Amino acid sequence: MTLAAVRALTFDVFGTTVDWRTGVAREVRMALEPHGPVLDWGAFADAWRARYKPAMAQVREGRRSFVVLDVLQREMLDATLAAHGMTLPEDEAADLAHAWRRLDPWPDTIEGMRRLRTRFALCALSNANVALMIEMSRFGGLTWDALLGGDVAMAYKPDAAVYDSAAARLGLEPGECLMVAAHPSDLRAAKGRGFRTAYVHRPLEYGPPAKATPDVADFDIAAESFVALAERLGV
Amino acid sequence: MTLAAVRALTFDVFGTTVDWRTGVAREVRMALEPHGPVLDWGAFADAWRARYKPAMAQVREGRRSFVVLDVLQREMLDATLAAHGMTLPEDEAADLAHAWRRLDPWPDTIEGMRRLRTRFALCALSNANVALMIEMSRFGGLTWDALLGGDVAMAYKPDAAVYDSAAARLGLEPGECLMVAAHPSDLRAAKGRGFRTAYVHRPLEYGPPAKATPDVADFDIAAESFVALAERLGV
């Protein structure tokens, strides 16, 4: 089965499709600055993000029942605020926890998706829940054929169940699905379930300095942008 | 809670958003005519459709495990062919079973959804599975914010679980969701779970003669088209 068999592209979202760090830093600044502190907003975003994998691991390892990412993000925010010796009024904390719904696409995202969608079904395959992705997609102008979120599979990547259930929902063989991600771990897990894989380099996902390209020999495609990916796929 | 609280519209698809009878009759004719018979193609479509509720009832009543609508449609097609004393080669039957992926929107659907989407999140809330809806939406040019199909809830309307799980996935209170359907039974079930309701009249869903408007006193809105619905909602 070659890449010619690919019928759907499944996209990682945070970091691959949208620039979470710039958006979260902006939202954190808007929420906290009126309360006085002047922080390194990017570093605050990083500290918040650093709690992401451990929080999901609790679910992935069965130490707590599945809860949607919105819930985890709120807990992670509260912990990050506490680590900075801060609290926020409830309504402001609830709104800031939704910072992850207000993130901008990378500059090539919209045009690349527009081109790719002329031939392929485009599906978000994110750990985000559907409600989060709806709002983020409307905020950033992203058009999907389907959203396959954490609360569709009721599991978190890189669990095999996420990829398996995505292929099933798409009614496709795994080899007809191409996972698009800036994260080798996501791609390796998808490949392990039979997906084809496209690495997209997002050197500024964690801010400057630019991240070096990792070893991408295991993946079918490595591209510098969604537009470059479209070109590689001939659309 | 008034209609001003509505944030998402959940749409029935077959009959409400797309004209299943014209499309299925066309596909049936294209598949069967080369084999010789000249039938009343609309009547064949009706006979196929008539097996829909009993087939879903088997799942809804626990007499069989959940299977996606594509599977039921294939079984229903085979039974309808048999009732006409016909069979088809396997590949042609498999393709014809996918007739439900190749249906045209009603003439007002695209423009109405475009207007409605400027303010509301638009979600398909259909008994169809995600794969079917992706292909049908691409065929007809429908743009959704999310697809909430039978294989997301793993249940069939009018089961309460379908509406409950839709509101949960949307992260909304039921009263923030407006169910849009041409079928009073769907609307009554949605209303029973706290949804707001909009009846859209599709007089030719079952072909001529035009269907009379049913009693719509129980519903928040009754409209003649998606464009009229947009006007009622002020968008």
Image: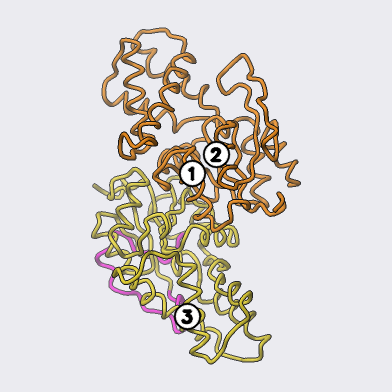
Chain colours: A yellow, B orange
Q: Residue at x 53, y 55 (%)?
A: B170
Left or right: residue B62 compared with residue A95? left
Note whether A221 is above or below A21 in the view shown: above
Q: Residue at x 46, y 50 (%)?
A: A146
Q: Are marks 1 and 3 on the same chain?
A: no
Question: What residue type is disc 2 on?
Answer: Ala
Q: CA distance from mark 1 to mark 3?
A: 37 Å
Of residue B188 and residue A8, the one placed in the foreground of this image is B188
Of residue A217 and residue A62, the one placed in the foreground of this image is A62
Question: What residue type is disc 3 on?
Answer: Trp
Q: Residue at x 51, y 81 (%)?
A: A78
Q: Are marks 1 and 2 on the same chain?
A: yes
Query: Which SS class for mark 3?
Result: helix
Mark 1 and mark 2 residues within 8 Å of each other at the beta carbon: yes
Relative image position of residue A62 (x, y in whole percent): 30, 68
Q: Earlier in the sequence, mark 1 or mark 2?
A: 1
Question: What residue type is disc 1 on?
Answer: Ala
Q: Residues within 10 Å of mark 1 (few under 14, many from 20)?
A: some
Q: Residues within 10 Å of mark 2 (few under 14, many from 20)?
A: some
Q: CA distance from mark 1 to mark 2?
A: 7 Å
Relative image position of residue A158 (x, y in whole percent): 31, 65
Q: Which residues are magenta?
A: A203-226
Of residue B99 and residue B231, the one placed in the foreground of this image is B231
Relative image position of residue B143 (x, y in whole percent): 56, 45
Q: Are marks 3 and 2 on the same chain?
A: no
Chain holding disc 3: A
Query: Which SS class for mark 2?
Result: helix
Look at mark 2 in the image and give the residue it sits on.
B189
Of residue A77 and residue B196, the one placed in the foreground of this image is B196
Look at mark 1 in the image and give the residue it sits on.
B160
Q: CA distance from mark 3 to mark 2?
A: 42 Å
Relative image position of residue B43 (x, y in whole percent): 47, 13
